[in-house]
Amino acid sequence: MGEHRNISNAVIKRLPRYYRHLGELIEMGTERISSGELSKRMNVTASQIRQDLNNFGGFGQQGYGYNVKFLYDEIGKILGLDREYQMVIIGAGNLGRAIANYTNFEKSGFVISGIFDINPECIGQSIRGVPVRNMTELETFASNNKIDIAAITVPKSAAVEVADRLVKLGVKAFWNFAHVDLNVPEDVIVESVHLSENLMRISYNLSKSEDERGRRHYGKEKAGKRI
Amino acid sequence: MGEHRNISNAVIKRLPRYYRHLGELIEMGTERISSGELSKRMNVTASQIRQDLNNFGGFGQQGYGYNVKFLYDEIGKILGLDREYQMVIIGAGNLGRAIANYTNFEKSGFVISGIFDINPECIGQSIRGVPVRNMTELETFASNNKIDIAAITVPKSAAVEVADRLVKLGVKAFWNFAHVDLNVPEDVIVESVHLSENLMRISYNLSKSEDERGRRHYGKEKAGKRI
DNA sequence: TAGATTGTTAATCGATTAACAATC
DNA sequence: TAGATTGTTAATCGATTAACAATC
């Protein structure tokens, strides 16, 4: 019962990627696939694929493999993609607009029901048919509309306060683009996209590649101690 | 020597977060901090902090802790933030603009040197002082300007081809926002931001929370086999 | 049936945490 | 010095991979 409690985070992080590849396979008209073939395609071990899927029950068949469409649908259900989610976007800047315009979202059941900003120039504008509302209307809006997810695309300085307001309004999931750790109650989900951290991993790896010839040192030199 | 080879990915992923928190501590005027205090602030174990930092050498002092400013600078160096990176953005849509307008990037040494698109309406426009160029000019541009990083904000269908072109031009790092796995040579870095995967983790967690009451099943029912 | 491939257990590998001696 | 806290080794935990019996 409740099959998907206690599934490790590592597994969950991989599910969307399985889902995407299976979608591509469907588009290609592939009907069945073995863990071995999928393994080659995705660059993960077949063992890992089978282990991951078995966390949720038996989706395959010995001697046959997995039915692509069936597996795709099942993973979709696991990921909760079989229903709609009402999402608001806080911040109608470039990032907020990018998200609002991201047509694919609605396809997968993420419906943008409101966009909010404090900038008078934005307020009243319409983005993809959704009007930009004044942040002062947030509470009224929330009492008339269920908000499943709030995307936070405001600057760091405002993000924490906005999140607090939304938590009070009962919002249980945040998609956070601000460079802060939101502090929310235990039962509230935060998924953060820290773009600057992304860039730092790139610069780390770039400078590492160069080091492979160059050589650099960090911290105290402890002569002879490390090699 | 060449201290930072063979550092595990898990460690590297945490470095930007240390860096951000240390930056906040500097702003607050904090001069020194122990692994224990930082541990409370960041919600990680003190042991992990010490282990992580010791991958790069001894930054602390027994009985004292870590000098915040010194540690911040050292981590900055490790992350390669002590130099500039030339970045181009492929795709002048909302997401491309969001990145281009992200003022903070230049602060940290990421300089946007070019923006490219195929849409005639965009070409010639200027975003933050950077003109939007025709994609056909990419090769010419690359021969006159070093490109350290390319941000790919074009649709999935175009992303793979664009990345191939850029690899041929010698670009060694990609910041990929398209929903595809870019296939690049071994020595090329790809950092992907798959927004839809983010959303799926949110929907997974939301539907899991609801299951905690509801109950759902996936896959074959094997009565009595699992509890 | 024989062959293929899963589901699943056991072995390995890696990452995190605990503990403590070294040392500021 | 005594107290605090690091650097580092050892113990634990968890995740990945290998192996193979079950079974389609």
Image: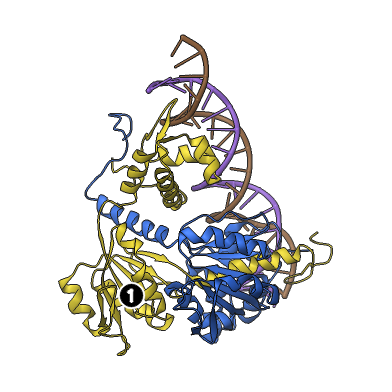
Chain colours: A blue, B yellow, C purple, D brown
Comparing A91 with A81, the one in front is A91
Provide residue A87's location: percent of width, then percent of height: 60, 74
Provide residue A135's location: percent of width, then percent of height: 55, 71
Comparing B15 with B94, the one in front is B94
Q: Is residue A50 visible?
A: no
Which residue: 34% across, 45% down? B4
Q: Is residue A145 visible?
A: yes
Identify the image quadrant of the C terminus of chain A. top left
Q: Compared to B27, does A197 lie above or below?
A: below
Q: Residue most toward the left?
A: B144
Element type at mark 1: helix
Horizontally, is A158 left or right of A147 in the view?
A: left
Horizontally, is A96 left or right of B102 in the view?
A: right
The answer to which image quadrant residue A216 occupies is top left
Q: Residue most toward the right?
A: B224
Identify the image quadrant of the N terminus of chain A. bottom right
Q: Compared to A78, does B82 lie above or below?
A: above
Horizontally, is A158 left or right of A199 in the view?
A: right
Horizontally, is C2 left or right of B186 in the view?
A: right
Q: How many marks?
A: 1
Provide residue A91's location: percent of width, then percent of height: 49, 71
Q: Compared to C9, does B44 lie above or below?
A: above
The answer to which image quadrant residue D18 occupies is bottom right
Which residue: 50% across, 85% down? A126
Alpha-carbon neighbours of circle 1 within 10 Å: few (<14), some, or many (≥20)? many
Q: Residue most toward the bottom?
A: B120
Q: Compared to A179, does A96 lie above or below?
A: below
Provide residue A45's location: percent of width, then percent of height: 52, 62
**Which residue type carries mark 1?**
Ala
Give me the chain letter of mark 1: B
Label 1 sits on residue: B163
